[in-house]
Amino acid sequence: MAAVTASDLRDGEVVFWAEGRWVKRFADAELFNAVEPGQAALDLARAQPTIVVEPYLINLDLEGGVPVPTSYRERVRALGPTIHPEMGKQAEGGLVVQALRAHAGGARSSGRLGLIRLKR
């Protein structure tokens, strides 16, 4: 399972792809169970260089039946600033935020690793 993420060019906010548009909450992200639809969404996202910076696919695991990013880095990005639990996106609470906080995996996103390899 995967999702597409990037940074909003206007304010630097982490955003997620959801059926042709960008959303700020991971809970609203479109999830892809197959490679082809995920890659197609990524191609569409990359065609928006004036809206987002460096879109890429992130791998997802299930935490209590709720999809969460496999990578610790991506969970932090999905929660927003982690200075205090009452700040950022994590302040909204809910099932997805609980799952993001509870997940213990730390693997890197293979999509991001591919991007890093391209830059060398």
Image: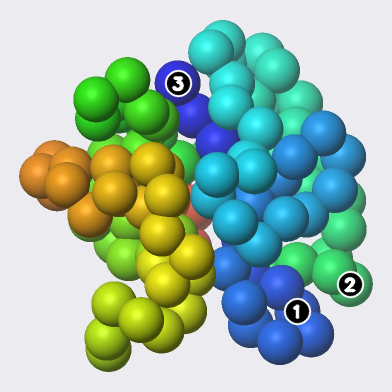
Q: Quadrant of the N terminus?
A: top left
Residue drawn at the location 42% of the way across and 50% of the way down: 94
Residue 52 in the image: state x and y as whole percent: 75, 67
> Which residue is more in the foreground, 56 or 21?
21
Is 15 situated left or right of 73 in this image?
A: right
Q: Nearer the viewer, residue 7 or 79?
A: 79
Identify whether 51 is placed above or below 105: below
Check if mark 2's residue and mark 3's residue have beta carbons within 8 Å: no
Q: CA distance from mark 2 to mark 3?
A: 27 Å
Residue 50 is labelled as: 2
Q: Residues within 10 Å of mark 2 (few under 14, many from 20)?
A: few
Q: What separation in Å lies between label 1 and label 2 (alpha carbons)?
A: 7 Å
* Helix, strand or loop for disc 3: loop
Q: Are marks 1 and 2 in contact (CB under 8 Å)?
A: yes
Q: CA distance from mark 3 to mark 1?
A: 26 Å
Left or right: 78 with respect to 43? left
As drawn, the label of residue 21 is none
> Quick one: label 3 or label 1, which is nearer the N terminus?
3
Question: Mark 3 = which residue?
Answer: 1
Q: Residue 73 lies in what quarter of the image?
A: bottom left
**Residue at 18% of width from left, 43% of height from top?**
103
Residue 37 picture location, percent across and down: 70, 18
Amino acid type at circle 2 is Thr
Q: Reply above or below: 41 against 92.
A: above
| Image quadrant assignment for residue 22 | bottom right
Identify residue type, mark 1. Leu
Amino acid residing under circle 3: Met
- Residue lying at 58% horizontally and 27% vertically, measured from the top left: 31
Q: Please tell me the numbered disc located at residue 9.
A: 1
